[in-house]
Amino acid sequence: MKIYKAIRQDHDIQRELCKKILETSGESEERKQLWDDLKKELEVHAVAEERYFYIPLIDTDEMQEDARHGIAEHHEIDELIKEVDEADMTSAAWLAAAKKLAHQVNHHLDDEEDDYFDKARDIYSKKDAKKLADGYEKTMKEYRKGWPESLPKNQS
Ligand SMILES: [Fe+2]
Ligand SMILES: [Fe+2]
């Protein structure tokens, strides 16, 4: 498998979780569980994707700007995650914050799939793209396990 498909599969998980979470209400077990799952997927994916998709592109003339933009959007998504976390789950503000997050996530995933993947195909060889997928998948597996403590940013 190449890096594009590996990432796309996880994007679909995120899309599904975003959709489901907006259909929940109040402080239900379902909402709590979905929020936990979505947060985990977003945080783990950002680390693995930066490492195995964006960071090697920063050194290229063609995609340096795109790579920086993509990583900057991960930080924006992080801020929106914080907003949801800080809102009271029973309030309308929580759902509003979750909607904002879901909107931003969907926009970001579309940018990656519709624009960045195409451009990256001119840079990464088929062999590179397979190697990157292996590293990406290994990292996803490793960090999903034991999340959130497993993430580099949460280790002291
Ligand atoms: Fe991303
Ligand atoms: Fe992504």
Image (tube, rainbow, N blue to C red):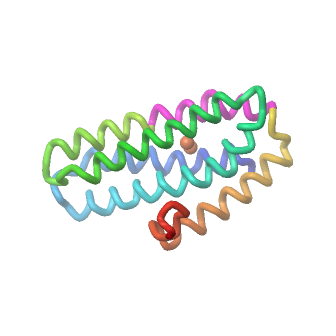
Q: Looking at the rendering, which quadrant does residue 37 occupy?
A: bottom left
Q: Position of residue 17 (x, y in %)?
A: 39, 50
Prevailing SS of the magenta stretch: helix
Which is nearer the eye, 29 or 72?
Answer: 72
Name the residue located 36 percent from the left edge and 40 percent from the top edge. Answer: 101
Image height check: is 68 above or below 37? above
Span of residues in magenta: 106-122
Q: Residue at x 26, y 57 (%)?
A: 31
What's the residue at 84%, 43% (across, down)? 126
- Left or right, 126 with respect to 145, comes to right
Asked whether 105 or 29 is in front, the reply is 105
x, y percentage for residue 22?
28, 44
Image position, residue 5 (x, y; %): 67, 46
Quadrant assignment, res 61:
top right
Quarter assignment of residue 106: top left
* Residue drawn at point x = 27 percent, y = 61 percent: 32
Ligand 2 quadrant? top right
The single residue placed furthest to the bottom in the displayed view is 146
Instruction: Please state the horizontal and vertical placement of residue 134, each as a whole percent of the image.
Output: 73, 59
Q: How many marks?
A: 0
- Extreme-front residue of the structure: 156
The reply to whether the magenta stretch includes residue 56 is no
